[in-house]
Image: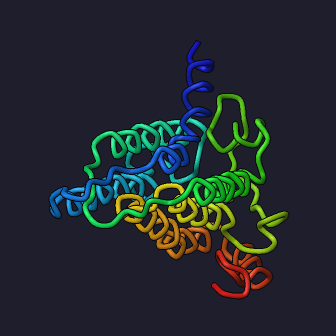
Amino acid sequence: MFNKLYWFFSYLGLMVLAASFVMGFRYEAGAPVGNILFNLGLYAIYIAVHIVMTLPAFKRAVFGHVEGTPAERRIYVTISILTWVGVYAFHQPVPGFAVNAPQWVQFIGLCDFLLSVVAFFEFATFESLGSLLGMPGSELSHSVGAETPLMTEGPYASVRHPMYRAAFFYAFSSLLIHPNTGQLLFAVMVSASFLGFIPFEERQLIKARGEEYRDYMRRTPYRVFHDLW
């Protein structure tokens, strides 16, 4: 019973971030400026929880080891989903500008957005997603430790963090669907947190995998944007 509930919850939860950008973030021309600070603080709490949960010291204190396990991944996934739902439920309308985009512009934005979501899950089959989510009975994937294979093929042969690149593009393509300051604020915050997490994550990868990851960095010098960064 637990396995079925977690299967439904986690696979549905994979879509909560993308669904938020399609639905749109709150905007009101006359909203208090303080709402921007409230949303920044709310998002900062969300990010802080995630950073703490990835720290080796936290893993050692809570789980007794720093290696990733499916059980640990399930806890992380569950908290990630619930905290993001909380951010989306409680964020406040943002003042500023809004553009009345014609339907054809929104249509192009939605097509770009969907293409970016496909790119985000480019590696995905239900089996591989089960590994990402820590599904009971699956082998863990996408951890910094040597307990999982290092992904270097497909999109990972072009840049080291293709999923983060896709998240950047779907966040900003959603501005064609909802061209207002509420959408812009969350596009900037989400993109900045993905890109800003890269140096932190790569330090963990180097520490855990050593020369294996350094060799991958030499073969694949770009983090997110090919020929740029």
In the figure, 22 relative to 57: above or below? above
Q: On the image, which quarter does residue 166 sit in?
A: bottom right
Please state the horizontal and vertical placement of residue 40, each as a whole percent of the image.
28, 62
Please state the horizontal and vertical placement of residue 118, each as a whole percent of the image.
73, 52
Which residue is nearer to you in this view: 56 or 157?
A: 157
Q: Going 73% across and 81% down the picture, which residue do you hit?
A: 226
Q: Quadrant of the C terminus?
A: bottom right
Q: Is residue 137 left or right of residue 176?
A: right
In the figure, 12 relative to 61: above or below? above
How many marks the image carries: the answer is 0
Q: On the image, which quarter does residue 33 sit in?
A: bottom left
Regarding residue 143, the answer to whether it shows in the image is no
Regarding residue 95, the answer to whether it shows in the image is yes
Farthest residue to the right: give it: 154
Q: Going 79% across and 41% down the picture, which residue do you hit?
A: 125
Farthest residue to the top: give it: 1
Q: Going 66% across and 44% down the picture, which residue do you hit?
A: 132
Instruction: Indicate the colouring scheme.
Output: rainbow
Q: On the image, which quarter does residue 209 sit in?
A: bottom right
Please state the horizontal and vertical placement of residue 106, each as a whole percent of the image.
58, 55
In the figure, 3 relative to 191: above or below? above
Please state the horizontal and vertical placement of residue 28, each as a whole percent of the image.
26, 54
Which residue is nearer to you in this view: 104 or 46?
A: 104
Q: Quadrant of the N terminus?
A: top right
Q: Is residue 87 left or right of residue 206?
A: left
Q: Going 59% across and 42% down the picture, which residue do you hit?
A: 69
Which residue is nearer to you in this view: 30 or 219?
A: 30
